[in-house]
Image (cartoon, rainbow, N blue to C red):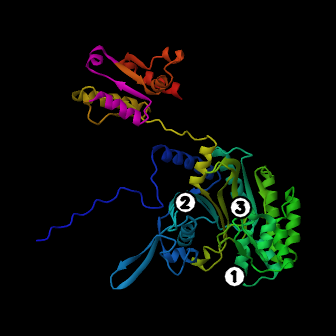
Amino acid sequence: MAKQKKQPRPKAETPKGFRDYFGAEVTQRSEMLQTIAGVYHRYGFDALESAAVETVEALGKFLPDVERPNAGVFAWQEDEGEKPGAWMALRYDLTAPLARVFAQHRNDLPTPYRRYAMGPVWRNEKPGPGRYRQFYQCDADTVGAASVAADAEICAMLSDVLEKVGIARGDYIVRVNNRKVLNGVLETMGLVDEGMRNAVLRTIDKFDKVGENGVRELLTKGRLDASGAYIDGVGLGVDQAAPVIAFLTSKAGDAAGTLANLRAAVGGSAVGLEGVQELEIISELLSAQGYGPDRIEIDPSVVRGLGYYTGPVFEAELTFEILDEKGRKRQFGSVAGGGRYDDLVKRFTGQAVPATGVSIGVDRLLAALREKGRLQGVEHGPVVITVMDRDRMADYQTMVAELRNAGIRAEVYLGNPKNFGNQLKYADKRNSPVAVIEGGDEKEKGVIQIKDLILGAKIAENATLEEWKERPSQFEVPRDQLVAKLREILAGQG
């Protein structure tokens, strides 16, 4: 009989494009999301937690590749016996599920419906540096409000969120534009071919990278890029490309000047003029609330990529400098974006339902806060109660219960207590601030030993400094002073 081949052990590795999050990272994200939720709640938005799985039919045409529902999203087909089952997919954002939720429960929900949602989303795309297939989003949307006052409110709320989590005024700008203005420019150019319009939109989106001359070349005959390769142009004439250049360079010293330039750029286009008027109203509403151009500004260069935006669009950009992987200075960039999408719910209801919202990139915002030193890089672990006598586990559990009831994070060491040194190594690995020691002698005398591990580490690093030598890192205190002494030590550690 042939010998059965031994099954190889599975590799202990994270799937490509995914990552694991540990202690401090999870805590930091949770605390930041709680802060953001507080701002959203103060603005009158309610929490919504929708399913992580949607039908591909519900996700609809906004899939990256509608012809292949398993491309771009993580999708599978349900097994329903003889007939093919429905295609299901992990959500790729939090907006498509909102459209389904509102359409499904619209008779029970208030209109306008104001909701915020936070959670992971999944993209079945090629991963790269800093680009993962699972990441967190943090959204707030108003469904059922046609007034651009809803868009202005989202922008104000986004500004408040950034400042509340620790991005100082002057380190960010919320930039606002309107897709109607851009549509007006395309109309003025006489572009009716969908492929040509999309080519122009893609070129406009490169304005930040290639500048005015670069866009002009890409719209017309083409250009040489930095590597020397020739990039074909869209093929417009110089005169035909002029409205795009006028649009992109219409930003003036103040909102009034920018709006005047935009009116000139859209010419007689009705939809373009409507977009300019909406921007003017947004500017007035924000000014009335005290949000000046130092926080929120009209900026024609903002072009959101998603096809479902129908009106105002906005982006939050962090303006402080960081060093890239090659040591070069660059701005941190965008951490949030959104806009008006009045046609998304219509797919379910057949009736137009206005909607506007914003999505914050949680991981990018956390990275920005770390760059600014607003997040503690290392999280302290629990106080560790060491076990000197395994037969007195009840005593140690009584001790840890006292600490927990006093609001102090604590645990009893539950590994093999035979080697005391290993217990202290465990506490160090947990980054514990304090170890509590009670052996037989201490029990008999009614005292405990408290070892300040943070101070001990500093003394070890700076053993030559007299100021550390004068400060003991281990204390003997009466057993009934355990909670009081620990509070004193933890307060001193900050």
- Quarter holding the C terminus is top right
Task: Name the foreground residue: 319 vs 144.
Answer: 319
Instruction: State yes or no: residue 427 in magenta.
Output: yes
Alpha carbon distance from label 2 to label 3: 22 Å
Alpha carbon distance from label 3 to label 1: 25 Å
Q: Name the residue under label 2.
A: 131
Instruction: Using the image, determine if residue 289 lies above or below residue 192.
Output: above
Residue that appears at 31% across and 16% down:
446
Instruction: Using the image, determine if residue 281 lies above or below residue 428.
Output: below
Residue that appears at 27% across and 62% down:
8
Does residue 331 appear in this view? yes
Q: What residue type is labelled 3?
A: Phe
Tell me the tag on residue 314.
3
Region in magenta: 419-447
Q: Quadrant of residue 190?
A: bottom right
Q: What residue type is labelled 1?
A: Gly
Tell me the element at label 3.
strand
Residue that appears at 66% across and 60% down:
337
Instruction: State yes or no: residue 329 in magenta.
Output: no
Decide which of tag 2 and tag 1 comes sooner along the chain: 2
Tell me the element at label 1.
helix
Q: Mark 1 points at which residue?
A: 195
Mark 3 touching mark 1, by CB under 8 A?
no
